[in-house]
Every structure is written in C-alpha cells, then in structure tokens.
Image (tube, rainbow, N blue to C red):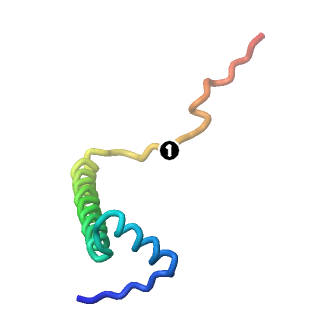
C-alpha cells in the first residue's frame, strides 16, 4: 500500500533531521508510531470492556432509590441559644 502525506516544509525538514539523528526512516518512524497507537487503543478497549463487564455484574447489587445530595443535610440543625 502506498500512502502520501503532505507535510508543511518546516515539518518535513524537522522530520528529516529527526530520522537522520535517530538512524531510522520516515516510514519506520510512522509504522512504529502507528503500531504503538493501535496497541494503545486495543488495550484501552480491553480495559473498558472489563470495566463494563464489572459494572454490569455488580450494578445489580444496588437497590432502592438513588441518593440525592441535600445541602441542608450537611449542617447541624439550628438551635436557639438563650
């Protein structure tokens, strides 16, 4: 497969300098980046799937009406001082 990327001249020069210093090629740099990104995305999807499964399994244990925060519950009742 052939892919063409149109880079601004300054970025193209910086990329060429980078690969020269690191002894690689633009193709290898791009493939390494793409492989790392795809791996990261697969791992993130796996973690999210595990979280969804855990939520699905443990969510059934919750019962009753959902808690609603009421600011007045955070303070002690007012008392009259004589």
Please tell me which residue lies in front, 27 or 53.
27
Query: Which quarter of the figure is the C terminus placed in?
Result: top right
Q: Percent x, y for residue 38?
A: 26, 68
Q: How many labels does the image show?
A: 1
Task: Give me the residue at 26% from left, 72% from top.
Answer: 28
Task: Give me the residue at 41% from left, 70% from top.
Answer: 17
Residue 67, quarter of the rendered image: top left
Q: What SS does tag 1 mark?
A: loop
Please tell me which residue lies in front, 1 or 47.
1
Q: Residue furthest right?
A: 82
In this rendering, position of residue 71 left or right of residue 51: right
Query: Which quarter of the figure is the N terminus placed in?
Result: bottom left
Task: Give me the residue at 75% from left, 13% from top.
Answer: 81
In this rendering, position of residue 68 left or right of residue 64: right
Q: Percent x, y for residue 4?
A: 35, 88
Residue 78, quarter of the rendered image: top right
In this rendering, position of residue 4 left or right of residue 71: left
Residue under label 1? 68
Image vertical order of residue 39 relative to residue 7, above or below: above
Binning the other alpha carbons within 10 Å of mark 1 as few (below 14), some (14 to 19) or many (20 upward) gives: few
Residue 24, quarter of the rendered image: bottom left
Please tell me which residue lies in front, 72 or 20.
20
Q: Percent x, y for residue 9?
A: 50, 81
Please tell me which residue lies in front, 69 or 27.
27
In this rendering, position of residue 3 left or right of residue 80: left
Q: Percent x, y for residue 62?
A: 31, 45
């Amino acid at each position: 497969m052939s892919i063409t990327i149109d880079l601004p001249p300054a970025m193209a020069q910086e990329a060429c300098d980078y690969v020269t210093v690191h002894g690689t090629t633009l193709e290898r740099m791009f493939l390494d980046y793409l492989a790392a990104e795809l791996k990261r995305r697969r791992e993130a999807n796996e973690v999210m799937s595990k979280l969804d499964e855990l939520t699905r399994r443990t969510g059934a244990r919750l019962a009753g009406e959902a808690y609603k925060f009421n600011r007045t519950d955070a303070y002690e009742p007012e008392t009259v001082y004589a």
